Image: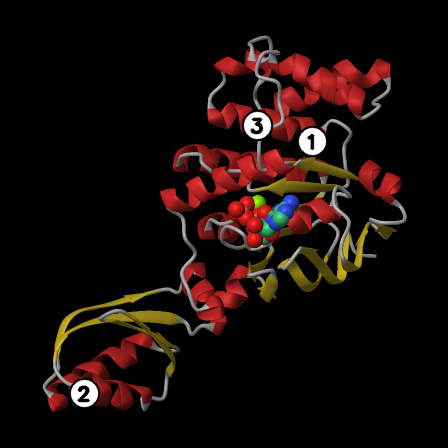
Amino acid sequence: MYSIETRSLTKSFGNVIAVNDVSFTVKEGEIFGFLGPNGAGKSTTMMILTTLLKPTSGQALISGFDVMTNAKQVRENIGYVQQESTVDEYLTGRENLLLQAKLNHIPKKEINKRIDDVLELIELADKQDQAVVTYSGGMRKRLDIAGGLLHRPKVLFLDEPTVGLDIQTRRKIWEYIKKIHSEFDMTIFLSTHYMEEADNLCDRVGIIDGGKIRIIDSPANMKNAMGNEVISIVLDEGERISFLSEIKKIESVKKINKDGSKLILFASNGTEVIPKIFQISSKLDVKITSISLTQPTLDDVFISYTGHEIRDDDSGFNRKREHAKMKRLRA
Ligand SMILES: Nc1ncnc2c1ncn2[C@@H]1O[C@H](COP(=O)(O)OP(=O)(O)OP(=O)(O)O)[C@@H](O)[C@H]1O
Ligand SMILES: [Mg+2]
């Protein structure tokens, strides 16, 4: 039995198809990630899987329970850490967890022990009696995650667990996620728009864009399928079209992307390709400004499957904020 299974899951809001015919499975114990830009449909999918939204069509099962017809059993089996923090800033960390424990109907006798355990796991025990308003962004996120663990769910959903955090804090949160995963032996479904995060944490990744899944595979397989190495070439001058057509003829070049004046080649044997590139450039009198050889990243994979770069800039973040605000207004 799969931990998570969706069959042609679809969700429309008016004319917007937020989730479009999405089918995938997640095995027990896996860390599975949705990687996609703002508006890709990550949160909508997660809200359906956690019974907070009804799909327009299709089916979703958690540990074999249907999210529509067995919502109660689904909720007992899952923890859900939302994209926006849900903790009360004016309560202390411990008080927030107490509230969460009561909402989750954890037996009274066990509450204190469970809270102690999660506080220790997430290393917040020494800050538990401070009001959350004094916490840093990373500490708040850790508290959010702790709240999702109290009832020891089999499947944990983390919606963009590190969005807006600086890179050091993000790395720390990754360590906590790995620790939780090994300690509780749970399935984790997370969403992210950070390549590095998907690469670092996930056994398998689904690239989602415009409500559709473009590919699902392990990060390593995705990168291998691109070719083993990436050669970036910046041309200064000369006849690019004939240069390109000559390069296409090199056998170990699997794929070529153009990014402005830069050519990105995916090749199975980069060190053999580079001298050939120089031969072609001197033959055609094309001047190369720079050339580099690297391993492919998930970034390259993303561009190749979606035709655009994932955006991770301020405008994206502000859009997200606006979007969250709109959702609250609509609600
Ligand atoms: N309640 C809603 N009403 C109308 N449209 C919605 C609603 N919720 C989401 N959408 C739309 O559905 C699409 C998918 O949104 P969703 O929030 O699932 O994306 P996301 O991948 O989580 O993005 P982000 O990275 O910004 O969190 C977007 O076009 C969004 O505007
Ligand atoms: Mg989202």
- In which quadrant will I find the N terminus? bottom right
> In the image, what residue occupies the spot 68% across and 26% down?
147
Instruction: Specify whether residue 33 is in view.
Output: no
Q: Earlier in the sequence, mark 1 or mark 2?
A: 1
Q: Which residue is mark 2?
A: 280
**Front residue of this view, candidates 229 and 214:** 214
Q: CA distance from mark 2 to mark 3?
A: 54 Å
Q: Position of residue 150 (x, y in %)?
A: 73, 26
Q: Mark 3: give few (<14), some (14-19) or many (20+) Cα within 10 Å.
A: many
- The amino acid sitting under disc 3 is Arg
Q: Is residue 187 above or below residue 304?
A: above
Q: Which residue is mark 1?
A: 148
Q: Earlier in the sequence, mark 3 or mark 1?
A: 3
Q: Position of residue 324 (x, y in %)?
A: 55, 38
Horizontal relation, residue 111 to residue 235: left or right: right
> In the image, what residue occupies the spot 62% across and 18% down?
88
**Front residue of this view, candidates 56 and 23:** 56
> In the image, what residue occupies the spot 66% across and 63% down?
20
Q: Which residue is mark 3?
A: 142
How many marks overall?
3
> In the image, what residue occupies the spot 61% across and 11% down?
92
Q: Earlier in the sequence, mark 2 or mark 3?
A: 3
- The amino acid sitting under disc 2 is Ile
